[in-house]
Image (spheres, rainbow, N blue to C red):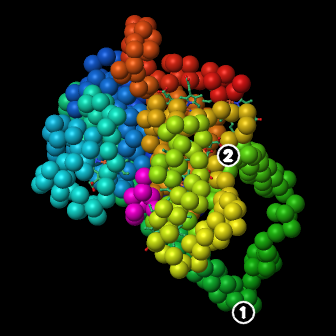
Amino acid sequence: MLALFLAVSAPAWAQQATVSKNGMTPGTAAAATPAAAAAPTGAQGAGGGDAAAIAAGDALFKNNCAQCHAVNDKVVGPALAGISKRRPISWIIPWVHNSSKVIASGDEYAVKLFNDNGKQQMPAFPQLSDKEITSIVAWVTSQEGGANQTAGGATAANAGAADGQTGAAAGAAAGGYTDMLLIVLVVVLIVLVVTLAIIANLMKDVLQGRKDLDGRDIEVLNQRFDWAGLYRSPVLRGIVGTVFALVLLYEGVQSVMAVGLTQGYQPTQPIAFSHKIHAGENQINCAYCHTSVYKAKSANIPSANICMNCHSQIKTESPEIKKIYRAIERKQPIQWVRVHNLPDLAYFNHSQHTQVGGIQCQTCHGPIQNMEVVYQYSALTMGWCINCHRETPLNTKGNAYYDNLVKLHDKSNNAVPFTVSSNGGTECSKCHY
Ligand code: HEC
Ligand code: HEC
Ligand code: HEC
Ligand code: HEC
Ligand code: HEC
Ligand code: HEC
């Protein structure tokens, strides 16, 4: 029975393992596309973009769009699969540059889309060039599952990525089915074991009543399972000991790796201030409160007088708002509890990333506009900083400072985009000095 159980469940586990390997988490999407980028020249996605453009599109998508969009699933915005067929690029570019302008122009498709998505405003991306948006679309197209792509002469690497996609989608459905199958099997096995035990007991009772049994039969009948012997068995002790040691080792390594990490940290704040109400529902710009975030190293926390711009009128009777008045009367700052905190040995500058790099707050801080209480979304480890520097193309357009560097880089290494790391963004002294 055990063999039967294993035989049936092994393919199910194997399938689940491949699903989690191919599942389109952002991390694995990253793993899939460098493969596509490294493929020999002529690696053409169905969108017609070349490998370098697709790789650039991948990074751009992750930095600007991934918090709201996925290729095959609805996140905040709709799934982008098939977008190049749904809409011409001449529509997509102005949409990404400023979607509210397209909606305001009365474009029928845009208005319907906006209404169908609960009138959620997609942020404007004026900093993205036409070419960058085209490369995002090329990347999206390269990630779409389906036969058309393989037929279109995709390379093995590209086809692999596409298979992963469809595999993940199919696997998710199959996963639910195999889970059910496993549960049913386990129940059936338990019922079987119980029935067999009952039958064995019944047969013993019947035999015990009989007088014509010889010595060996009686011995068999009275046989008990030797639990003490099993307990003393060195083989069993060895197996249990090894498993126990491995679990302990695994847990130990996990907890040591987590020392000093505070991902998910969500302290209770002195006032029940909600980013969901302010930055989400009321669409107050982040920089209205965090005024220095585009200009300085640190993003400041707003002082009480910024709150008073509105709360001198709004909700003046709320006990939470009265806490703001009390702080002002006492001339004491509100004692917000700090959430993010890099160690002093590392240098991080907001303006470098938000203003110069053009990275959205949400890329690092997660969906702040949906948080009632802020928590630390990213791990803030060194590996996190470095990985992004390796993957993100540097915005060099219209900046003469970079012209020669980009030319030299392209000459020596033209398949790889000019990333932050190509410009020395992974050198120790950029962050430690
Ligand atoms: C903060 C969330 C958010 C971000 C970030 C975001 N979008 Fe959107 N996007 C939406 C929403 C919501 C819609 C649906 C339309 C609406 O409600 O305005 C949408 C719609 C779209 C559409 C039309 C989809 C269709 O089915 O016709 C495209 C194309 C698109 N986004 C591309 C992008 C690209 C490219 C980026 C990154 C540069 C991006 N979006 C970043 C939220 C977002
Ligand atoms: C109405 C003012 C206001 C707006 C708008 C606002 N914030 Fe905040 N933010 C605050 C206040 C007050 C705090 C401190 C209390 C807290 O952590 O909730 C804070 C805290 C934070 C923190 C955590 C800081 C820490 O302690 O590490 C982050 C990150 C943050 N905001 C990001 C954003 C982003 C991103 C946006 C835009 C989507 C935004 N904020 C919009 C007022 C605002
Ligand atoms: C640009 C205007 C604006 C600013 C600035 C602003 N708020 Fe608000 N706040 C609002 C609005 C609008 C509401 C929602 C009121 C409602 O639910 O009717 C709100 C609601 C609140 C609430 C919930 C009150 C309740 O009892 O439901 C709290 C707490 C709050 N704000 C704290 C703050 C703090 C602290 C600051 C300063 C860091 C701040 N607000 C800055 C506009 C603002
Ligand atoms: C590249 C990643 C990244 C981006 C983009 C980013 N932040 Fe941060 N943010 C961080 C890190 C890292 C810290 C912790 C800094 C420290 O402890 O010195 C932080 C800290 C903060 C803090 C706490 C105060 C401080 O400066 O330590 C606030 C508030 C904040 N960020 C708001 C924002 C807002 C608003 C935006 C968008 C305009 C934004 N951040 C964009 C990575 C980022
Ligand atoms: C989401 C991607 C992203 C993350 C995460 C990120 N960075 Fe950056 N970083 C960039 C980009 C893009 C630039 C280049 C900005 C430019 O000059 O155009 C940059 C530039 C820098 C620079 C300047 C490099 C130079 O060549 O002058 C430093 C220093 C830096 N980052 C530190 C950090 C630290 C420390 C962290 C982690 C706490 C971090 N970054 C996390 C994207 C990121
Ligand atoms: C992009 C920015 C960046 C670069 C480049 C970088 N680091 Fe780091 N490093 C960090 C950050 C951020 C931390 C803190 C991470 C944490 O608290 O977990 C850190 C932590 C460390 C620590 C751990 C210190 C401690 O006490 O925990 C060491 C050691 C270190 N870095 C060495 C290096 C070396 C060596 C290099 C060059 C090969 C380097 N770093 C390059 C950002 C960077």
Task: Please report the residue visible at 56 percent of the width from the left and 51 percent of the height from the top.
Answer: 377
**Which dot, 1 or 2, sits closer to the camera?**
2
- 282 magenta-colored: yes
Q: Nearer the viewer, residue 288 or 244?
A: 288
Q: Earlier in the sequence, mark 1 or mark 2?
A: 1
| Disc 1 element | loop
Q: Nearer the viewer, residue 348 or 47?
A: 348
Q: Is residue 358 above or below residue 70?
A: above
Residue 318 horizontal/vertical position (percent): 54, 78
Where is mark 1, residue-wise? 209
In which quarter of the view is residue 177 placed? Answer: bottom left
Whether the residue carrying mark 2 lies under 8 Å from ligand 4 is answered with yes
Task: Please report the residue visible at 52 percent of the width from the left and 42 percent of the height from the top.
Answer: 293
Q: Is residue 56 above or below residue 209?
A: above
Residue 267 horizontal/vertical position (percent): 66, 61
Whether the residue carrying mark 1 lies under 8 Å from ligand 6 is answered with no
Task: Please report the residue visible at 56 percent of the width from the left and 37 percent of the height from the top.
Answer: 296
- Figure quadrant, ligand 5: top right
Where is mark 2, residue-wise? 341
Q: Nearer the viewer, residue 191 or 216?
A: 191
- What's the amino acid at mark 2? Asn
Between the residue at mark 1 and the residue at mark 2, the CA separation in whole angstroms equals 78 Å
Segment tinted magenta in the rendering: 278-285
- What's the amino acid at mark 1? Gly
